[in-house]
Image: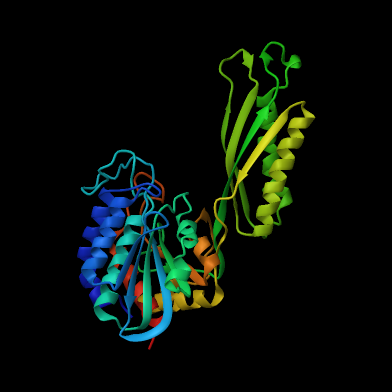
Amino acid sequence: MPILNRAAELQREVMEWRHHIHQNPGILYDVQETAAFVEERLRSFGVDEIVTGLGRTGVVGLIHGRSQSDRVIGLRADMDALPLEEITGKPYASKTPGKMHACGHDGHTAMLLGAAHYLAETRNFSGTVAVIFQPAEEGGRGALAMVEDGLMERFNIQEVYGMHNMPGMALGTFAIRKGGIMAAPDKFSIRIKGRGGHAAEPHRTADPIAIGAQVVNGLQLIAARNANPLRSVVVSVTQFHAGTTHNIIPEEAYLAGTVRSLDEAVRDMAEMRIRQLAEGIAAANDAVAEVDYERACPVTVNHAQETLYAARAAMEVVGEPNVNTEVDPSMAGEDFAFMLQARPGAYIMIGNGDSAALHNPAYDFNDEAIAYGISYWVKLAEQRLSA
């Protein structure tokens, strides 16, 4: 079946909303302008109840169906942008230097607004749809903030669903999988405290640079020799800072990086081995390593039955051949994981066509995906709340 006729009719208007959001990006919880725009649109649709300030700057709208039921499902979009300088050259490019929608959250928000518009017009379902507009997905754990603020209990949400665009996936396609679909994105830092001195007398020092180099090499063994090769883990050192000039061995070196895993046992192992390797290598060289390990959000785990529901809705929009139900998991992270820990649900990818990569200053959400996204949300809501 093709996209909904009404979704196609809404395409241009929703695109204009998307461009407005794109021009006015906010970082983390500082999305007041986008939240106010979302609230204004929801009111204009005649949404039954609107709650603002949930999880600091989140917005929730409740849309009741034609018939009464205690069934409630949640549909979530993220609102925040990234600290990047945009280079797209588009007429609707960001008006705020150093901030841009480089992950497509402007498109996610606009598509869910379009779905809310449609659902408020038709109300062809039994129960309630909660449209959830979340701040601070990009490292701020906004999903957890909304959950801890009572999102699920306050609105009696029983299932929750999310969607993200995917560059390189063809327009008019969707992708999903049961189980882990996005990784746990942890970060670590290691401060190596050695003994500095003259570079001409290295034997009188405990060189934190040489020790740090050994630590970097040692960390590569976690994926290569400690992890089961059938259970993926990524350990990347992305920072190494030390020294001030050419003839001084410094007192300290600083390393930092990220760990990505799709399994909690592997995650635990990686954290343990980072500590053991850094501390052991430092001690063997008469130095000390201080390790800080921060867990950002858990693995994004799709529930089995809800994955089937999401896939079925996508198939109604684009046809079964255009829905990949066994997509490879991504090692990127997603704080929607917290919502999936709180309630059963699923997270699906929608094709963004041949665009620049996510988190790239040349990236732009593909407006041609809008009607597909609206149609998916509507089909999912109507199927899950069928009278």
Which quarter shows the C terminus?
A: bottom left
In the image, residue 312 lies at what x, y percent?
44, 79
Q: Is residue 173 left or right of residue 292?
A: left
Q: Name the residue at 44% across, 54% down.
A: 137
Counting labels gives: 0
Q: Give the camera-side residue of 84 and 33.
A: 33
Which quarter shows the N terminus?
A: bottom left
Image quarter of residue 291: top right
Image quarter of residue 47: bottom left
Q: Give the camera-side residue of 161 and 350.
A: 161
In the image, residue 257 lies at what x, y percent?
58, 41
Q: Is residue 95 left or right of residue 281?
A: left
Residue with the most extreme bottom position:
387
Residue with the most extreme right position:
284
In the image, residue 29 lies at what x, y percent?
39, 50
Q: Name the residue at 36% across, 44% down.
A: 361
In the image, residue 296 lies at what x, y percent?
55, 51
Asked whether the viewer can see residue 335, the reply is: no
Image colouring: rainbow
Up/down of 117 relative to 29, above or below: below
Asked whether the viewer can see residue 127, the reply is: yes
Q: Name the residue at 33% across, 78% down.
A: 64
Q: Give the camera-side residue of 265 and 214.
A: 265
Up/down of 35 relative to 279, above or below: below
Up/down of 356 relative to 307, above or below: above
